[in-house]
Amino acid sequence: MSVDPDIEDWLRFTLVPGIGGATQRRLLQHFGSPASALGASPSAVSKLLSATAASAWRTGADAREIQRVIAWLEEPGNHLLTLADAEYPPALLETADPPTVLYVKGSIDRLSMPALAIVGSRNATPQGLSTAREFAQALGSAGLTIVSGLALGIDTAAHEGGLASAGSTIAVVGTGLDIVYPARNRDLAHRIAAEGAILSEFAIGTKAIPSNFPRRNRLISGLSRGVLVVEAALRSGSLSTARFAGEQGREVLAIPGSIHSPLSRGCHVLIKQGAKLVESVSDVLEELHVASPVSVALDQSNDDDPVLAALGHDPCDFDTLSQRTGLPVGSLQTRLSELELEGRIACLPGGRFQRLPTN
């Protein structure tokens, strides 16, 4: 498959080191197209650039990097979308800082669908993972594409739920699309590429640099009608995604949790700041003005089992459970093992137990 010459111009234009999106858009506004900017005299271009950027422009993009991207584009399912393309995600065009080009692996049609971002802690609890997965599947079945960041924890669960629905999922990553980060999500990334889409503004070969991930967060929110946060500590990167959402005019939603859990504090802060408190799927659909018969609440079941009743919905250690139930140690150990095998509780690090939502 041959690559359109216009694409080569876009690559020569965007792969100049040290010239970012804002400067690229300024050049496009002045010259009209990459080809015109590339064909302009150095003095004409230099008037729009700093001295450092003008020097980089004169040096130009690395030809080897351009060829590396072209080789990637020749592989099935790989795309480069530019600001001039009709397929460029319309939601991103509404934001203040849309990338000049987007690298996409998978379905570009998916990028124009109504979407919801679901994000949260990398170190999520079993209940948080279950909640994210169930919400993603239900909201995907209601017609929303689920957007997240391919990280471990809540992101992974959100993608899995999206893949289980008609809405599928989009992963926005902070590396080049020839790299899967984290490597543990390689199989998940392959599924997303086959059934949804993976998107990045970073060129092929870009490694997992920490500063890239806050930048990708603005694209997660920008692609979406709103951001739903499921479990987040006070310093969670998910809060930056929520902040971008507010700046972009998107809805911010959060699921509350235990007052004793550090992973609830970020969500509680968002709710105090005006985020929509979410207890059910219908809360999300109502906030986003999406009409759907789907309505799935968080687990509110009352269970007559004395161990589950004593456990409640917060993590609890064995000694505390023993005091609450009054059961002999052996009987309690047996019952906890049975409940874990039934998928009704999870054993956490530190010898604690947590109740899981019922299906």
Image: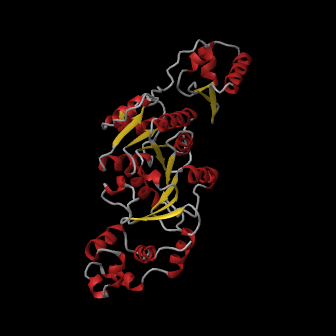
Query: Based on the displayed image, in which of its 4 quarters is residue 234 positioned?
Result: top left
**Vertical position of residue 208 compared to residue 189: above or below:** below
**At 39% across and 33% down in the image, what residue appears?**
285
| Residue 209 visible at all | yes
Between residues 44 and 311, which one lies in front from this camera angle? 44
56 relative to 126 in the view: left or right: left
**Vertical position of residue 214 compared to residue 160: above or below:** below
Between residues 347 and 106, which one lies in front from this camera angle? 106
**Residue 3's x, y, as percent?**
51, 73
274 relative to 262 in the view: left or right: left
Between residues 342 and 98, which one lies in front from this camera angle? 98
Coloring applied to the structure: secondary structure
**Residue 318's x, y, as percent?**
64, 24
Between residues 203 and 349, which one lies in front from this camera angle? 203
* The N terminus sits in image quarter: bottom right
> Outermost residue, front direction?
1
| Residue 277 visible at all | no
**Number of numbered discs:** 0
**Vertical position of residue 235 compared to residue 253: above or below:** below
**Residue 254's x, y, as percent?**
40, 36
**Vertical position of residue 19 compared to residue 246: above or below:** below
* The C terminus sits in image quarter: top right
**Residue 155's x, y, as percent?**
52, 45
Query: Based on the displayed image, in which of its 4 quarters is residue 227 positioned?
Result: top left
